């Protein structure tokens, strides 16, 4: 069974994780000030983890079969 | 020589590191665009955030008013994705702002141009290659907040270095001119020593 909304959800989640990785890479590789880089990464990871977990929690509650015409 | 006041600038940059920094090289100035430029770039994200908060609290009322029979969890899921993308975009904007710098050291000027993620230009210029430095402040807001551009005319391949929207452009121009004079004098002294057969 192919559920388009679930596939879309995973595509978006993967995109978020890849972009987060790219951001952390830039902050860490090109840092000008080490302390600020560590602080920035910690802030970014903290807020991102919160947002991502909240997103996951909502996704678990969602009725994925609501759009019947998008399920094959 | 740099004045005492200008030299005091230096201790702020002792812990500054960048790729290609040479041993014993001292950072004299680290310049990036004025903070107001970042605030203006940050503004759309603030609007998105505000929109999300308003939509979160009034969305239910709107749904009831329009008599839409939608699963509210879907609404929250979309809202959550928007919040994540706004957060990521904010950081990408911050990276483009923070890593887009001009570093003036005691021997050269390094221009690090962060265009986007994975798009970066680095060029450098030795002080003795500088021919002319011009600072420009145009407009009411740049005058009030004291930010503007500094143009550096060079004798090298890259004809012009431009420091865009930096704070205190006049002071930056003065510091660059002093460093250029010092470098040229040093070059002349070395040339004289070669002529005299000392080197």
Image (tube, coloured by chain):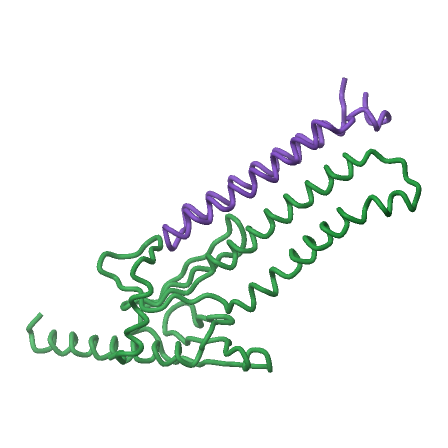
Chain colours: A purple, B green
Picture residue at 25% right of the left edge, 75% below the top = B183
Q: With B177 as the anchor, is B48 left or right in this view?
A: right
Quadrant location of the C terminus of chain A in the rendered image: top right
> How far across and how far down the image is residue A36, in percent?
41, 52
Of B181 and A34, nearer the camera is A34
Of A39 and A34, nearer the camera is A39
Res A48 quadrant in image? top right
Q: With A71 as the anchor, is A18 left or right in this view?
A: left
Q: In this picture, is B121 found above or below A20?
A: below
Q: With B70 as the anchor, is B11 left or right in this view?
A: left
> How far across and how far down the image is residue B79, in percent?
72, 43
Q: In this picture, is B129 found above or below A22?
A: below
> How far across and how far down the image is residue A23, in percent?
51, 45
Of A53 and B110, nearer the camera is A53
User: Residue at the top extreme?
Assistant: A1
Q: In this picture, is A52 found above or below B44?
A: above
Total marks in image: 0
> How far across and how far down the image is residue B94, in percent?
53, 55
Picture residue at 25% right of the left edge, 78% below the top = B182
Quadrant location of the N terminus of chain A in the rendered image: top right
Picture residue at 36% right of the left edge, 74% below the top = B155
Q: In this picture, is B112 found above or below B92?
A: below
């Amino acid at each position: 069974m192919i559920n388009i909304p679930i596939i879309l959800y995973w595509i978006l989640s993967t995109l978020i994780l890849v972009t987060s990785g790219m951001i952390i890479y830039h902050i860490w590789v090109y840092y000008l000030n080490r302390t600020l880089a560590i602080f920035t990464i910690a802030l970014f990871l903290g807020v991102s983890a919160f947002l991502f977990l909240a997103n996951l929690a909502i996704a678990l509650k969602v009725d994925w079969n609501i759009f019947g015409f998008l399920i094959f | 020589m740099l004045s005492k006041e200008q030299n005091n600038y230096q201790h702020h940059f002792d812990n500054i590191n960048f790729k290609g920094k040479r041993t014993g090289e001292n950072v004299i100035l680290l310049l990036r665009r004025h903070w107001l430029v970042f605030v203006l770039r940050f503004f759309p994200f603030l609007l998105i955030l505000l929109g999300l908060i308003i939509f979160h609290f009034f969305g239910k009322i709107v749904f009831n008013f329009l008599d839409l029979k939608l699963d509210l969890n879907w609404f929250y899921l979309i809202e959550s994705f928007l919040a994540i993308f706004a957060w990521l975009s904010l950081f990408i904007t911050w990276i483009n702002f923070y890593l887009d710098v001009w570093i003036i050291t005691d021997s050269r000027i390094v221009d690090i141009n962060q265009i986007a993620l994975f798009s970066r230009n680095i060029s450098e210029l030795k002080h003795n290659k500088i021919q002319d430095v011009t600072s420009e402040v145009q407009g009411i807001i740049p005058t009030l907040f004291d930010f503007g551009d500094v143009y550096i005319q060079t004798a090298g391949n890259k004809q012009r270095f431009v420091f865009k929207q930096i704070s205190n452009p006049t002071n930056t121009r003065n510091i660059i001119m002093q460093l250029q004079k010092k470098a040229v004098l040093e070059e002349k002294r070395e040339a004289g020593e070669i002529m005299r057969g000392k080197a």
